[in-house]
Image: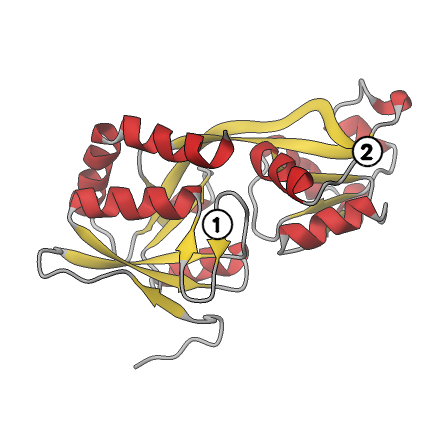
Amino acid sequence: MIKYLCIIFILLAPLSLACEKTLKVGIGQPWPPFVFKGERTLSGIDIDITRLVLKKAGFCSQFVLLPSSIRGLVELKKGTVDVLPAASYSDERAQYSHFSLPYRRERMRLFWYENSAFVKHDLQHLMHNGKTFVINSGGYYGEEFAQLSQQTDYKSLIVPVKMINQRLLMLKAKRVDFMIDDEVSGLYLMAEKNIEGISLHPYIVNDNPIHFMFSNKTVSTAHSQKIDDAIKQLETPITNIINHYTQ
């Protein structure tokens, strides 16, 4: 058996003889309420939706735990994992993968300690003023952020950190000016940890649909079509899962 150093451990969903294929699903660091990691179990919005959709489509699921989101992209490109949930589309990613229909939306927001001097600033103007940002390693924040983050003057302002708890603590300690993260996840953790004073900047960094992302090396279009069909049929149960964790 091939061993991957990047894989922490593997959790197997119950196997069934009725499964057409077992799909290896890459999962990064805990990201409440989308991914919770227990000792031997996984749960959360994306975990529960993944299990539901793959089962409906006739597939078994094997969750492969990886050290970061960016490592998940590397393993998907190689074909050592088949599926990544919670994926945003980009032209770069589409060169080595294909995407399901969307199953939820994601809004990337700026979390900060409010300063009235910068309330009306957009992302570019915040960077122009030397503001610093902590982000998820391998996360996608839209084309505007992708372009700005490649500019020489702004690269040093961006700090990639793989765990959201660490990103939030950096902001709380004011080691950075902003945390860019999913609105739902950031607000969830702030409430859970009873953190006061941090709020949402009015500017929305990115608002886009979220998909399953499939490896071109291991998942056929026929298989991805079955998953698309399952997503269409499960619209109400998917909404119920999201509401269960967020209301």
Most foreground residue, 72 or 11:
11
Provide the residue designation for mark 2: 197
Count of labels in the image: 2
> The N terminus appears in which quarter of the rendering?
bottom left
Give the amino acid at mark 2: Gly
Provide the residue designation for mark 1: 35
State whether residue 221 is above or below residue 4: above
Most foreground residue, 89 or 113:
113
The residue drawn where x is 55% and y is 41% is 140
Q: Position of residue 76 (x, y in %)?
A: 39, 57
For the residue carrying disc 2, how many other residues have a C-alpha within 10 Å: few (<14), some (14-19), or many (20+)? few
The residue drawn where x is 75% and y is 23% is 122
Most foreground residue, 39 or 136:
39
Image quadrant in which you'd find residue 236:
top left
Give the amino acid at mark 1: Val
Q: Position of residue 48 (x, y in %)?
A: 36, 45
**Where residue 65 is drawn, which disc sits there?**
none
Q: Position of residue 144 (x, y in %)?
A: 63, 31
Q: Position of residue 73 (x, y in %)?
A: 46, 55
Is residue 157 shown to the viewer in this render? no
The residue drawn where x is 55% and y is 49% is 31
Q: Say which element carries label 2.
A: loop
Q: Earlier in the sequence, mark 1 or mark 2?
A: 1
Q: Say which element carries label 1.
A: loop
C-alpha gap between disc 1 and disc 2: 25 Å
For the residue carrying disc 1, how many other residues have a C-alpha within 10 Å: few (<14), some (14-19), or many (20+)? some
